[in-house]
């Protein structure tokens, strides 16, 4: 069933049936003759046409043939540099929902992309196990002054120096306007033209691979952005059966759900195969509703496995979920969905509330120092009643290995969804900030940094969007004001203003102050220790022991491996703690002078916010 | 944690937490002093009172104490024959949602029931394996002229003569008015007062057990009836998160879902323990939405298992679902929900359309005679596209044993949801009707009869309700008219009219005609064969073979067991088929004279609609 010279369809076997999933969109099927095949799913349409724009400003309309129910096809030969739209009867001309590039944004023409144009230099990521990864989450638009893929490329040596080995890009699917976090993606296959071209993205990934850095992509399958989303014109991609926080749910189990299922499964395959991403981070899978016999998440995981097997490569799939549900990561044979890992908010919230004493929103469920003991080996919420959720929450993850959980001190949501977008660095005293980093890297989980965390960035990461529709602009500003009623609107940045976007750009290293440099030096050191020390390298929960002494606010963490014991001692209180009773070699002290502290060499005292790591062999 | 002398709470272990599920409602906790405990969940209420009515027409108001958040408790001593309501602040007095009896209907006072009053004569069902059951579905109100539990008791010998060994009662929870199918239950713990008292129901079950008949109950957890449903006043039992065909979904996973979860889990326990039902049939589980980590259906199954283990008894849980999803019946260790069996509509629809040629509604997906081959070993829809559902439907059940599926030629839905409520007996010629029965009992599944089927009842089973609210009455009549627009309203029975209910009552045996008696004799024979013949007794799919010869409309079914082969030959066409090439002892012929046919002894011909079973040893 693989037609030579054609874009292969996805073919798989389900419940005794061979399912052929026609590949939608525009694909070059013969580079010699420059034949391009166009295929579109247009539900219940009679007249579907292809509007071509191939230079000279003139357009041409080609009829499309019905290939099978709801699916229309045509092809061109000899034409290069094609931009196109589909004409849907008398409703108008619209971009291709499977478009690979939107040079003029979500509403403009779609461009045919030649995926063989880029010549890959590296054979793909030859890196570590998932268990060894240290993630660095970044937003392309604000990571560099340029805000582009090329900008990132110029900072790869910076990331290498820092020591992270996995970059996680916030979504790069095309969004409306000039700035956006990425979660308003409307063309799921189009590389954000604000960030560069498809070739730019490939080059970035290729160069990362050359430097031993894995690249992960954040993908959003729980909803689509409100602007430039033409999917409803093409077919029943949404259903009123369920409500999500962002409106109608994507239709994964209602009538004609094969359309949305195909969209998502082809999208998974597209990023992993055409761009060689090493893994995906699925946004908010708890808002993906599917009560059919085969959950779309299971099918996504199977698609990832198929690609890994066929390409003899590693592919990791990571889910963001707030349900604390181990079914997401448990293997399918045990009834689980089989994701490689999931985000674990409980870890973040526990440390955040211990450090800040905040109580607003979901932080009401957190706070006691004692919680650290539990979140070093399990969710904090493993079935007990949650005041914020107002129901019993979570499952017991004590038997799940540590590498199944991604934990962080900061991420785009935890920073950006605050009224003022403050990073932890502006909320917490410098010593405690370094202690927090040490707690993160001593935890038997996969650590994730949010860009800027490594040098205690003080600029905010704010919520910003650039909707074009005036009504949408007004609404997003208004709803932001309503969300943070207790704040003076004057002190809140308006999400639609360019200044909000610009304010969120990282400080260039040449503008760093002393504290930034000290923090960076510290992160380099703790990351290096994590990657190389036999007791820290593998996130082994069974070789981890933690004890909290609440009275003196002392946290003791032991990790061991290959006969070496590391003992972390952390003073989260204000009073000094005597260290005399603890032996071992001082291999890291957050208060060493090179990190802006008071101490050189061995210290007998744990100062406020001080953390020391001792080693016993 | 079991307090002597108190109604024990349900205590179970989940995710490392001991969950104490307070038992709600009124319970006699000391029969000597006649102490009665009242407990009610009244969300966010401050003032909750107990309004007592203990004879003499006078009422008395007792304050209730807050025992824990949202839960109020009080007790009385020395008072017998108590009727009561709960007073919710200034909102009024309302029946107990956990009431065990509503002598005056859904809106009236709740009655305290002494569950130790009835003395059980039999030690519980000592019967067969689930695999050997032959179900008889009945509606209490129309099964006998009296329409009561006592009425059924007088017909137990009739059922014994017929040979069925499991009675499945349509729901008996209290509904509004004087007649109702039962799916409008508003007080899930109250025995329908139209049918009798709690003691009457216990006596019926006890007598069934004495005669070796299991008793199953149909329970409805996907919605509650629209009238007399005071649950929303008591707490967040419903959620707008999902839509069901009957309005807001029961809240099994949203905020405060523990309320509805407790309601349902205690209800499961209540019927199985207090009434000694042998199993439950859960109505439309596909409309039970729960995306939390522990699905309520899993918890229902676990509750059933716990009761079976603790009571050293058999408990079977059967799900009605239209999803063709084997996850419902697969064991939890494989990610399934673990129901013992599920209803299989594909079997019904396949035979129904073959016999009637009907094409309306979901029958559009069925029709070809060839389908029989597949539905004898699997669902018909195992993943392929369904025109009615407009999506791919179903999973492959080929590896699931036959005893996991309940199949029927008729049931309350398939008959009662027709415009005119016609039974198969009025749609299909007598010979074909007997052939259909033979196809049912030769199938390797659990057969279910719908009351009246056994003697080819010709009266309809219509849809009837007796809402008290004039608006509801008008709406249900109107929506019925809209559903069946193509019918002349004059020829459709109005669901709210008493005559519709009375028309649906079964013909008493002394009014039977010749055909009724012949059919009954035939059902007795085929049921007896199914129960005793070594090739038919166990629903073994692997010892079953079926071949359809479409040209002559001949169906050949082979079943074998213990060295004996049964060959069923069925002529579903109009032309006679020569039987000479088939050998074997004629052990059943639908055309034998005692069944109203043309033949005595061995026949060389298969007449139209004729089915013959041959035996080879």
Image (tube, coloured by chain):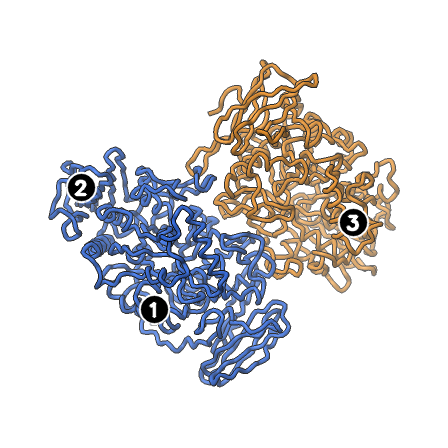
Chain colours: A blue, B orange
Mark 1 or mark 2, earlier in chain: 1
Q: Is residue B207 visible?
A: no
The label number, if any, that marks residue B424 in the structure image: 3
**Element at label 1:** loop
**Chain of the residue displaying label 1:** A
**Chain of the residue displaying label 2:** A
- In this view, A251 is above or below B246: below
**Chain of the residue displaying label 3:** B
User: Residue at 20% across / 44% down in the picture?
Assistant: A610
Left or right placement of residue B287 versus residue B516 in this view: left
Q: CA separation, marks 1 and 2?
A: 42 Å
Left or right placement of residue B392 versus residue B440 in this view: left
Q: Is residue A94 visible?
A: yes
Q: Which of B227 and A302 is in front in this view?
A: B227
Residue B350, picture quadrant = bottom right
Residue B116 location (% of width, % of height):
62, 21
Q: Which of A561 and B201 is in front in this view?
A: B201
Residue A515 location (% of width, % of height):
20, 54
- In this view, A403 is above or below B75: below
Residue A380 location (% of width, % of height):
37, 41
**Element at label 3:** helix
The residue singled out by tag 2 in the image is A607
Binning the other alpha carbons within 10 Å of mark 3 as few (below 14), some (14 to 19) or many (20 upward) gives many
Query: Disc 3, disc 2: CB below 8 Å?
Result: no
Residue B517 location (% of width, % of height):
85, 41
The label number, if any, that marks residue B529 in the structure image: none
The residue singled out by tag 1 in the image is A148
Query: Disc 1, disc 2: CB below 8 Å?
Result: no
Left or right placement of residue A283 versus residue B449 in this view: left
**Element at label 2:** loop
């Amino acid at each position: 069933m693989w037609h030579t010279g054609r874009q292969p369809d996805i073919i798989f076997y389900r419940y005794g049936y061979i399912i052929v999933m026609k590949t939608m969109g525009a694909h070059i099927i013969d580079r010699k003759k420059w034949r391009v095949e166009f295929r579109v799913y247009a539900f219940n349409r009679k007249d579907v046409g292809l509007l071509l724009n191939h230079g000279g400003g003139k357009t041409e309309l080609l009829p499309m043939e019905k290939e099978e129910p709801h699916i229309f096809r045509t092809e061109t030969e000899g034409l290069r540099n094609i931009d196109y739209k589909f004409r849907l009867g008398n409703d108008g001309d619209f971009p291709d929902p499977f478009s690979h590039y939107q040079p003029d944004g979500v509403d403009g023409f779609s461009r045919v992309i030649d995926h063989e144009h880029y010549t890959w230099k590296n054979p793909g990521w030859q890196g570590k196990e998932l268990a060894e990864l240290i993630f660095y989450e970044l937003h392309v638009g604000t990571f560099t002054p340029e805000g582009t893929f090329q900008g990132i490329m110029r900072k790869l040596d910076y990331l290498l120096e820092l020591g992270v080995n996995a970059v996680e890009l916030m979504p790069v699917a095309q969004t409306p306007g000039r700035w956006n976090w990425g979660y308003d993606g409307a063309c799921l296959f189009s590389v954000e033209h604000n960030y560069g071209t498809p070739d730019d993205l490939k080059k970035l990934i290729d160069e990362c691979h050359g430097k031993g850095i894995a690249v992960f992509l954040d993908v959003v399958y729980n909803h689509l952005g409100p602007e430039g989303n033409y999917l409803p014109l093409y077919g029943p991609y949404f259903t009123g059966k369920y409500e999500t926080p962002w409106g109608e749910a994507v239709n994964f189990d209602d009538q004609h759900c094969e359309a949305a299922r195909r969209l998502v499964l082809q999208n998974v395959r597209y990023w992993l195969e055409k761009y060689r991403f090493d893994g995906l981070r699925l946004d908010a899978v708890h808002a993906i509703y599917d009560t059919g016999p085969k959950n779309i998440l299971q099918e996504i995981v199977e698609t990832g496995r198929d690609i890994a097997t066929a390409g003899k490569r590693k592919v990791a799939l990571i889910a963001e979920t707030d349900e604390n549900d181990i079914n997401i990561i448990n293997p399918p044979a045990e009834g689980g969905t089989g994701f490689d890992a999931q985000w674990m908010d409980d870890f973040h919230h526990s440390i955040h509330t211990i450090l800040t004493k905040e109580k607003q929103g979901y932080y009401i469920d957190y706070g006691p120092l004692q919680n650290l003991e539990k979140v070093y080996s399990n969710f904090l919420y493993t079935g007990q009643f949650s005041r914020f959720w107002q129901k019993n929450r979570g499952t017991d993850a004590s038997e799940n290995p540590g590498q199944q959980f991604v934990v962080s001190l900061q991420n785009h949501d935890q920073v950006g969804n605050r009224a003022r977008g403050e990073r932890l660095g502006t909320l917490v005293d410098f010593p405690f900030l370094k202690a927090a980093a040490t707690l993160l890297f001593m935890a038997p989980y996969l650590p994730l940094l949010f860009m800027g965390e490594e040098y205690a960035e003080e600029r905010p990461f704010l919520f910003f969007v650039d909707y074009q529709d005036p009504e949408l602009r007004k609404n997003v500003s208004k709803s932001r004001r309503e969300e943070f009623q207790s704040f003076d609107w004057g002190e809140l940045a308006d999400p639609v203003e360019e200044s909000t976007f610009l304010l969120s750009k990282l400080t260039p290293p040449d503008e760093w102050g002393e504290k930034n440099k000290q923090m960076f030096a510290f992160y380099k050191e703790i990351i290096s220790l994590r990657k190389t020390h036999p007791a820290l390298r593998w996130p082994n929960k069974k070789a981890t022991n933690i004890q909290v002494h609440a009275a003196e606010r002392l946290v003791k963490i032991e990790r061991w491996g290959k006969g070496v014991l590391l003992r972390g001692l952390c003073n989260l209180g204000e009073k000094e703690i005597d260290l005399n009773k603890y032996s071992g070699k001082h291999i890291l002290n957050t208060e060493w002078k090179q990190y802006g502290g008071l101490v050189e060499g061995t210290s007998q005292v744990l100062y406020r916010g001080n953390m020391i790591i001792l080693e016993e062999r």
